[in-house]
Amino acid sequence: MSKYLLNKFLFTVDRDPELVERYREDPADLVTWWEENEANRILNCIADERSTWLAFTDEERAALTAHDHVALFRMGAHPFLTLTLFIAMFERDNTEPLQYQKAYGAALAEFSLPYPDIAT
Amino acid sequence: MAEVVAVIASTHHPFYYRASTSTGDDRPPFADEWVAKIERFRETLTRAKPDVLVMVGSDHFHQLWLDNMPQFLVGKAPFYDANWYNEEREFGLPRFRLEGHEELSSHILRGGLDSGFDLAFSNELRIDHSITCPIITLRPEADLPIVPIYTNIFAPPLPQPSRFVELGRQIRRLVESWPGNERVAIIGTGHLSLELGGPRQFGPHGPDPEFDRKAVEWIASGDIEGCLAEVTLDSLHAPGNATHGFMDFMLMMGAAGDGVRADHVDSLDLFHTMEAYFTWYPKATADGTHGAGRADA
């Protein structure tokens, strides 16, 4: 399991407006594309100098594809990265202030301290 | 020698800008009280007449990333562009550019390295809301040169709380040993209890009002010893999963000095998290007036 790679996905998608929209509209396609093209890219290196070893587990790929922020929390993805990206995708559907943010927290009600470890 | 004319510690609430500039139905009911408190807080910096701002904050996974993560980093650049796409998107924060003070950055880097802090540095740093929020609240003119200092409160493994306190003490010493004539304010922002992306987020108050009450008292009274006796990397998980940002307040307690009571203390109980504002005037005089006040007299 690679918390680092989950975080890398959340980080690189969140900072790119086009990827945020693609992830909202067609998560399976975006996750597949990202794992093939971006997972091994070292962020400040040229394409030829890629890593060779990073891949999602089936569980990680499924959680990302399902927009399953509860599973991501359970796996120890960084909660700030997950929250920021998911707000970007879904806050726009709110019919009242903070509706999505509150529902996001309520969906995590099963967790008590200590939360899953986020150290990478 | 340079003079530290104010030490300021604050929460950095990214919603303040939007709340304070919104009008009509969009203006939240707490906005007017929040703005009034911020304007009083801003006056505590204005009256200190600073020339330079040393600004302590924490990058929120904007420029600093897990493939190369510094624990403490000092910016050394002639300019700092500010705010990021996802902060515009979520908080409506404006982009702007601040001037840097490269000589003071160099002095802090050299002095830090020579005194046991292996500081990282950056010659091209785009700063985020941990530093721009206090610009918006305390110096909206954004007209003073800055030295940005980033701490890692975000991506474990983190430095121990005692290291934050000691770095704050050292920053204070280093500014006071700077052979310039500038009036320097040291400003740092962090959090009280806070939960982000967990089950306790976005409640009617901060996730742990009892922690907040104790934290405000530690800061206001400069009780570093009491604070360090209770706060550990493990203990900070309990008040909320983003409460390690409190260590930036501990850094500022180090900068303000052991047992030194803050001259301005204010707080505001908001949904999601408590706001808290503190200002110390280091040059307090025997008759109870303060350096900045004396300058006004």
Image (spheres, rainbow, N blue to C red):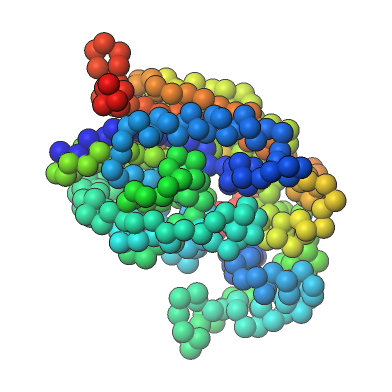
- Is residue B247 visible to us here? no
Q: Quadrant of residue B250?
A: top left
**Residue B267 spot, x, y in % from top left:** 55, 27
Q: Residue at x 76, y 79 (%)?
A: A29
Q: Quadrant of residue B84?
A: bottom right
Which image quadrant: the N terminus of chain A?
bottom right
**Residue B89 spot, x, y in % from top left:** 64, 59
Give above or below for B156 relative to B95: above
Q: How many marks?
A: 0
Q: Residue at x 30, y 61 (%)?
A: B78
Lateral position of residue B105 relative to residue B69, left or right: left
Which image quadrant: the C terminus of chain A?
bottom right
Q: Residue at x 38, y 45 (%)?
A: B55
**Residue B190 spot, x, y in % from top left:** 49, 40
- Determine the residue located farthest toward the right in the rendered image: A95
Lateral position of residue B33 relative to residue A61, left or right: left
Front one among B176 and A32: B176
Front one among A94 and B136: B136
**Residue B287 spot, x, y in % from top left:** 26, 11
Front one among B88 and A59: B88
Front one among A30 and B138: B138
Q: Residue at x 15, y 38 (%)?
A: B1
- Is residue B89 visible to us here? yes
Q: Quadrant of residue B69?
A: bottom left
Lateral position of residue B219 relative to residue B87, left or right: left
Give above or below for B203 relative to A75: above
